[in-house]
Image (tube, rainbow, N blue to C red):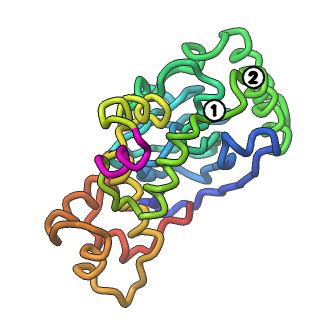
């Protein structure tokens, strides 16, 4: 996320327990010291969001973000945090959410769905009550892990799709989908359907997210943006600028002038 306000945000990171590591990248607890707005950059997996203090608004909505699953998007989305608000985020690995959710992940694309529409309402209510009672973030993480383990449906991921994700990531998003399907010995229509269900978006969309993330993660201030765009597989500078602004909400020059996001 890229900050837009003078107030700071406290960010606490926690790694999952060993049993959940194949499915969850990490947990984040974020606390806002004042009213501020952040740009939520597109990620490579859905996120489970559990607000336990204050009020948080997504996409300039008047609806307070509570307990929900936020699906994947191809555009930056503004998130407004009120003073004193706090939220716990479960950042899944690619395809990891399918271990807990039966619904194909592409059905969440671009949406935020209330958690009680995904999991048993009594268990969601109990989690919400308990998160408001405990005093430490470590205890909150324990509660969420216990909740997730109760929803556990399968202990492995789709190996073919996991392999496809690894190939796309290793090539920084520069891999033709038809070549990838051929390498995996599956027809392209079946591959794309299976990929969307397991990851949440099409392989082409996923590749574009990986490509922009690669630029953000590797860019150095002395580099020429035209050269960067060419090395990243973009057709031309205009194509790069357009995709980058959709992704971050800012031009490359504006974005990198502030420095890379801290989380």
Residue at the spot 71% in from the left edge and 54% down from the top edge: 13
Cα distance between the residues tagged 1 and 2: 9 Å
Residue 73 pos. (x, y %): 37, 40
Q: Which residue is more in the foreground, 35 or 194?
A: 194
Q: Are marks 1 and 2 in contact (CB under 8 Å)?
A: yes
Which secondary structure, mark 1? strand
Residue at the spot 82% in from the left edge and 44% down from the top edge: 17
Which secondary structure, mark 2? helix
Residue at the spot 75% in from the left edge and 39% down from the top edge: 20
Query: Which residue carries the number 1 mark?
Result: 50
Q: Quadrant of residue 10?
A: bottom right
User: What residue range appears in magenta?
Assistant: 178-185
Residue at the spot 30% in from the left edge and 76% down from the top edge: 231
Query: Which residue carries the number 2 mark?
Result: 127
Locate residue 156 relative to residue 226 in the image: left or right.
Answer: right
Residue furthest out toward the front: 185
Confirm whether residue 70 shows in the render: yes
Q: Residues within 10 Å of mark 1 (few under 14, many from 20)?
A: many
Q: Quadrant of the C terminus?
A: bottom right
Of the numbered discs 1 and 2, the one sitting upstream in the chain is: 1
From this view, report whether residue 244 is shown above or below residue 153.
below
């Amino acid at each position: 996320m890229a900050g837009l306000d003078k107030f700071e945000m406290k960010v606490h990171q926690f790694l999952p327990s060993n049993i959940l590591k194949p499915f969850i990248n990490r947990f984040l607890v974020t606390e806002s010291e004042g009213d501020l707005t952040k740009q939520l950059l597109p990620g490579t997996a859905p996120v489970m969001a559990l607000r336990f203090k204050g009020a948080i608004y997504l996409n300039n909505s008047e609806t307070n973000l509570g307990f929900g699953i936020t699906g994947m998007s191809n555009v930056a989305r503004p998130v407004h945090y009120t003073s004193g608000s706090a939220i716990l985020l479960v950042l899944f690995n690619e395809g990891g959410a399918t271990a807990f959710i039966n619904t194909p992940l592409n059905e969440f694309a671009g949406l935020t769905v209330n958690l009680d529409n995904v999991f048993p309402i009594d268990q969601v209510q109990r989690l919400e009550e308990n998160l408001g009672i405990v005093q430490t973030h470590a205890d909150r993480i324990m509660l969420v892990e216990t909740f997730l383990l109760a929803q556990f449906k399968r202990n492995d991921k789709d190996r073919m799709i996991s392999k496809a994700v690894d190939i796309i990531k290793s090539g920084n998003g520069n891999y033709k989908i038809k070549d990838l399907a051929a390498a995996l010995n599956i027809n392209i229509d079946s591959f794309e359907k299976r990929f969307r269900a397991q990851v949440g978006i099409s392989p082409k969309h996923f590749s574009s997210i990986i490509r922009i993330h690669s630029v953000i993660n590797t860019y150095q201030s002395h580099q020429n943006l035209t050269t960067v765009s060419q090395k990243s597989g973009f057709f031309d500078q205009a194509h790069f600028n357009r995709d980058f602004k959709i992704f971050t909400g800012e031009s490359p020059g504006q974005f990198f002038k502030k420095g890379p996001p801290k989380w």
